[in-house]
Image (spheres, grey):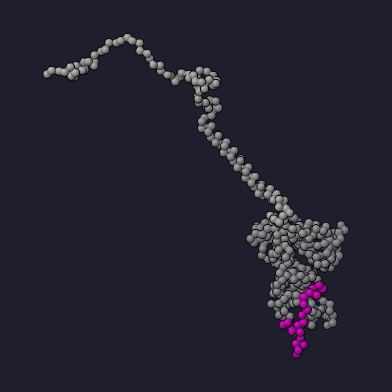
Amino acid sequence: MKKSSNNKTLKERFEELTRKKPIIEEAVPQRPVRHVEKKLDLPFLKDIDVADDKATYGAAEDVEGEWGLTGNDRTLKIAHRRRFIGLIIASAVLILILAGVFYILPRVLPGLFEGTDIELFEKPVINLEYDSEDVRVILDTSVSVMASPDPTGQRLTEVLYNEPVTCLNDNGGNYIRIATEDGIEGYIPVDSVTTATESVEPDMHQYKLVVSDPYKNIMTHASNGTLMRRVVMNTVLYADIKREGVYQVYLPTGESGWIGSSGVIELGVREDTEEVTSRYFVSSLLTFVNARYLENGITMYGISINGAIYVSAEINGIDVPRTVAGQMDEGEEIDPGTDAVTGEVIIENILPGDILFLRSPVASPNDDRVYEMAVCTDTGTLLMQSRARTTIRLTSFKAGDSICDRIITIRRIFRTE
């Protein structure tokens, strides 16, 4: 088989490839290799002050070596500092907002609108009723007003806790001469009053309270407090705070106390008690049954018929004098009439709430001097002093009894139902 010149056997090709070629000694230029350690000579790096040949541009700072901090420490401290600064800024903004709303605006805005028809804030008008230097306010539950500066003298009436009176004469002794608001003049102990009048100024408070129970306690706290003062029926107090079931009242001593809402009448500071019917008047009178009798007394600790009429009428909407003579002219005079056959007084015409003025049992029929008083509480029943003049009691009477012969006049001050 003839072989082509171009067609070599596999063996011949292998020998040709493995045959060593002669080395031709010719200088072969070597391509330079760039090493990273070689310092770069760039124009924009010429202004950088390099301390030595080992320093390179962009080398990381050794935070731990230079500052004593690890990477985590440095990051946390920056975060904490930023959070603290943010808290300070937020607190400052909040304080500025509160100051603007509650302090700056209430003082600035009224001046801006002054003289215009726009009223942003209504200023309370305070009219002082007791700004005279002669006004005194009672400090005790009740104080007897005497005809002379002597505790054994005649008792004209009593004044109650927180009641304003006018000092007529203070000679530096143990008693001062005063006048009540309804014109009774007499003497009371000097240490039973104060010159502070804030507790009786209506416009300085929010509520007016009139005690309608025989007595009420003023406590140091709204619950579980200690007793500060016991007050009696017809005592007038002024309150600043009202909560469920209690009021905070301002006292003549300058303190505040708490009183329960039951047994008190709440009014506007310049309102008077609403007038009611004789049924409520009688109900108030009956709270004094069996109370100790005291000449011209007006409290449950010592009461007279004219005193009981005074306080019971006041809390039920009718102003009456404290004295027997003053009450004798109040209301409407009632003529009960007499029976056409027997000539006896018709007691059915004497209604609950009617006031009877009686002469002495030994006085003549023409004697019009009042010996005692009585109030009809029911048909044939009177509230009057006991025969021994020690208590107030209920007494039954009927037509033809001696009481009917002693009647001087009958007055009706409340409307009947």
Q: Is residue 217 magenta?
A: no
In the image, what residue occupies the spot 77% across and 75% down?
A: 331
Q: Is residue 224 above or below residue 391?
A: above
In the image, what residue occupies the spot 86% across and 59% down?
A: 170
Across and down, in percent, residue 234 comes to: 74, 66
Q: Is residue 340 magenta?
A: yes
Q: Quadrant of the N terminus?
A: top left
Q: Nearer the viewer, residue 255 or 23?
A: 23
Q: Quadrant of residue 284?
A: bottom right
Q: Nearer the viewer, residue 297 or 161?
A: 161
Across and down, in percent, residue 278 comes to: 71, 75
Q: Is residue 142 visible?
A: no
Q: Quadrant of the C terminus?
A: bottom right
Q: Is residue 343 above or below residue 48?
A: below
In the image, what residue occupies the spot 75% across and 82% down?
A: 336
- Residue at the extreme left of the image, as rendered: 1
In the image, what residue occupies the spot 84% across and 80% down?
A: 367
Tell me which secondary structure the magenta stretch mostly adopts. Answer: loop
Q: Quadrant of residue 155?
A: bottom right
Q: Is residue 392 left or right of residue 134?
A: left
Q: Is residue 231 above or below residue 8?
A: below
Across and down, in percent, residue 207 comes to: 70, 61
Across and down, in percent, residue 63 comes to: 53, 27
Which residues are the magenta region? 325-349
